[in-house]
Image (cartoon, rainbow, N blue to C red):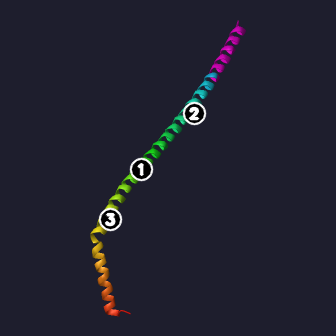
Amino acid sequence: MATDLIDEIKAAEEKAAKNVREARDNAAKELNQAVADAEGRVKEARQAAVRQFREKVQMAERTAEMKARSMVAERETGAKTFYANHRDKVAAAASWIAEEVMVKYGRG
């Protein structure tokens, strides 16, 4: 009877040790899986953030390009208007300068 009791105790201890090993193995597997899932989510989040950043930069570039084209068109219109308004004055000023130079330095 004592032998049976000792055998039962040893069997229970072995079973308990086996259960502990299995529990540790399962816990390690679950932990590794959780870490892998977390790393995957972090990677996906990082990729999404980079993609959003890239899209925002592209949108800002398009907006800036449209503003720049609008500004250039405005300035071109303004320059053409200025040129049209002052074309005659420039010719008169150039003629006056030429006369002044010829008077001061001679004609030949």
Q: Residues within 10 Å of mark 2 (few under 14, many from 20)?
A: few
**Badge number at residue 80:** 3
Q: Closer to the observer: label 2 or label 1?
A: 1
Q: Please state the horizontal and vertical placement of residue 10, each as a whole percent of the image.
A: 69, 15
Question: How many other residues sit within 10 Å of disc 3, few (<14), some (14-19) or many (≥20)?
Answer: few
Foreground residue, 9 or 28?
A: 28
Mark nearer the N terminus (2 vs 1): 2
Q: CA distance from mark 3 to mark 2?
A: 65 Å
First-in-chain label (1 vs 3): 1
Q: Residue at x 35, y 93 (%)?
A: 105
Asked if the magenta segment contains residue 4, the reply would be yes
Give percent across and percent down for residue 54: 47, 46
Residue type at the position of mark 2: Ala
Q: Nearer the viewer, mark 3 or mark 2?
A: 3
Name the residue rendered at 55%, 36% in the picture.
39
Image quadrant occupied by the C terminus:
bottom left
Q: Which circle, 1 or 3, is nearer the viewer?
A: 3
Residues tagged 3 and 2 counted as in contact (Cβ below 8 A): no
Residue type pointed to by label 1: Arg
Residue at the right extreme of this rendering: 3
The quadrant the N terminus occupies is top right
Q: Which residue is mark 2?
A: 36
Left or right: 85 as drawn, with respect to 69 = left
Q: Amino acid at mark 3?
A: Lys
Q: CA distance from mark 2 to mark 1?
A: 39 Å
Residue 55, placed above or below residue 38: below
As drawn, 57 above or below 30: below
**Residue at image mark 1:** 62
Determine whether the residue tagged by mark 3 lies in a helix, strand or loop: helix
> Is residue 20 shown above or below 75?
above
Instruction: Specify start and end residues of the magenta stretch as a single range.
Output: 1-21
**Residue at position x 65%, y 20% in the image:** 17
